[in-house]
Amino acid sequence: MLDPRRLRLLAELADRGTISAVADALAFTPSTVSHGLSTLEREVGVALLERSPRSVRLTPAGAALAAEARAILARLGAAEVDARAVGRLDRGELVMATFPSAGATLVAGAVTLLRRRHPGLELRILDAEPSESVGQVAAGEVDVAVVYEYPYLPSVEQAGFEALHLTDDPVRLRLSHEHPQSGSDRVELRRLEEEAFVAGRRGSACYAFARAICAQVGFEPNIAFETDDIAFTCALVKAGVAIAVMPDLLVGRAAHSILTRELSPTLPPRRISAICRASARRLTSIEAAMTALADAAAAAPEEALAPIA
């Protein structure tokens, strides 16, 4: 059986091109790398490298094995992650990540259901945006993550994950009671070109989303205020110094009363889902968490998901 450590040397050589580069990347000596590759060639029984005094390159057989090595190492890494996660779950622990607006509604309800249905299950809840929690699920640090996807932005990478759609979060215009458009039930998005917007900080999904929706109708928004603080966002909107385009859940717990209006064209909703590693979906505790989240989403009263008018 081939040694995964030597397969890694071959895969690294395919990516980095030289033995010295592989040695630097893995903190080995060049002679250790060279010896490991020679041993791998003897194990396989065919030439994997073409050597010259100043360089080395993969033979066709070496390139083919390097490609397989990457897949094998990825599967071994996933198996290690699952083993650690299953070990934690076998001890009756489950780690769930959620972003705040879903935590206040869907996840709070799911935790209540899990406490009642599985009193022996120890829960840890982490506050994390999807950009962070997706990586935590992949690494086995989190078992289930509640994530969102905005329309017009790249989707969450689904490779190796299983996703369960929980709910759609409508996206609407937020403005002050004194805004000139306050008397309209529906506002043309392109008529907001001269407005000052408040959105998330540069680099956030909210910031990118504000730019993406305006690009759909042909203008670049003036994002004059950048903040991830929802109370601050709503205070700016209430004061009439900015408008915002936001999902309902994001403002559903806001302290300030602001107006909500439909946009034209109507925007697709923000999709909220629960994700877990596909290999862990069969585990009882994972199934219990996914079921509780689905039940909480189905049972959530409309007023709990609606914005303050």
Image (cartoon, rainbow, N blue to C red):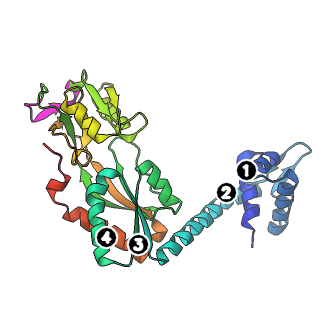
* Residue of label 4: 291
Which image quarter: residue 292?
bottom left
Do the residues under discs 4 and 1 have CB atoms within 8 angstroms?
no
What SS does tag 1 mark? helix
* Residue of label 3: 122
First reached walking from the N terminus: tag 1 or tag 3: 1
**Screen quadrant of the C terminus:** top left
Neighbour class for label 1 at 10 Å: few (<14), some, many (≥20)? some
Type of amino acid at the residue the image marks with label 1: Ala
Neighbour class for label 2 at 10 Å: few (<14), some, many (≥20)? some
Which one is in front, 148 or 103? 103
Do the residues under discs 2 and 1 have CB atoms within 8 angstroms?
yes
Q: Within the magenta stretch, is there residue 120?
A: no
**Image mark for residue 67:** 2
Q: CA distance from mark 2 to mark 1?
A: 9 Å
Q: Which residues are magenta?
A: 182-191
**Image mark for residue 14:** 1
Q: Is residue 174 left or right of residue 221?
A: left
Q: Nearer the viewer, mark 4 or mark 1?
A: 4
Neighbour class for label 3 at 10 Å: few (<14), some, many (≥20)? some
Where residue 85 appears, as percent x and y from the top left, is 51, 69
